[in-house]
Image (cartoon, rainbow, N blue to C red):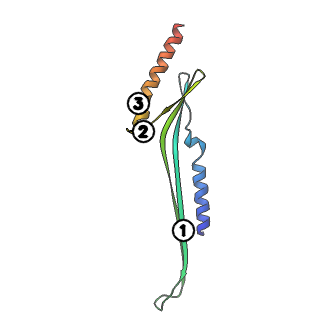
């Protein structure tokens, strides 16, 4: 397999991995409120190759070829979209503290808001 084929295959594989379901996660529904996680996706890849022949008397005079490619993907949570009763809001995840901690910290607040809304609707 030549380097251009390796890079084409690597690019196709990364494209299949980085679809919209990765950037926007599956919606989570909690008592009538939909929460959609959003992530920042970073993709990088590269490769190279070469071919050569023996140049001195010690080499066997053979030809050689080498090539390779590599890539990586990084995902980072950045926000959640919250939809309830026809209203949509975006809550940023992050800041100076850990982004995962921020996301976890949002869960009790969201559940409390849902609980409060449910109690209000039951009273009506």
Report how far apart the C-alphas of labels 2 and 3 lie in the structure: 10 Å
Q: Measuring 53% from the left and 67% from the top, which residue is drawn there? A: 68
Q: Is residue 2 above or below residue 121?
A: below
Q: Which residue in the protein does label 2 denote?
A: 99
Q: Which residue in the protein does label 3 denote?
A: 105
Tell me if label 2 and label 1 are in contact, CB under 8 Å: no
Is disc 1 placed on a helix, strand or loop? Answer: strand
Q: Is residue 83 above or below residue 101?
A: above
Q: Which residue in the protein does label 1 denote?
A: 48
Point out the tag, 2 or 3, that comes first from the N-terminus. 2
Residue 70 percent across, percent down from the top left:
51, 61
Residue 17 percent across, percent down from the top left:
57, 49
Is disc 2 placed on a helix, strand or loop? Answer: helix
Q: Give the quadrant of residue 7.
A: bottom right
Is disc 3 placed on a helix, strand or loop? Answer: helix
Point out the tag, 2 or 1, that comes first from the N-terminus. 1
Q: Measuring 61% from the left and 66% from the top, which residue is drawn there? A: 4
Q: Is residue 73 above or below residue 122?
A: below
Q: Residue furthest bottom?
A: 57
């Amino acid at each position: 397999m030549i380097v251009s084929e390796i890079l084409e295959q690597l690019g196709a594989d990364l494209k299949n991995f980085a679809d919209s379901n990765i950037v926007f996660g599956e919606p989570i529904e909690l008592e009538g409120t939909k929460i959609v996680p959003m992530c920042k996706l970073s993709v990088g890849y590269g490769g190279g190759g070469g071919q050569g022949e023996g140049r001195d008397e010690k080499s066997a005079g053979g030809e050689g070829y080498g090539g390779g490619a590599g890539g990586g993907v990084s995902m980072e949570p950045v926000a959640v979209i919250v939809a309830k009763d026809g209203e949509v809001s975006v809550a940023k995840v992050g800041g100076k503290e850990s982004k995962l901690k921020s996301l976890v910290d949002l869960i009790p607040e969201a559940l409390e808001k849902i609980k409060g809304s449910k109690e209000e609707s039951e009273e009506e």
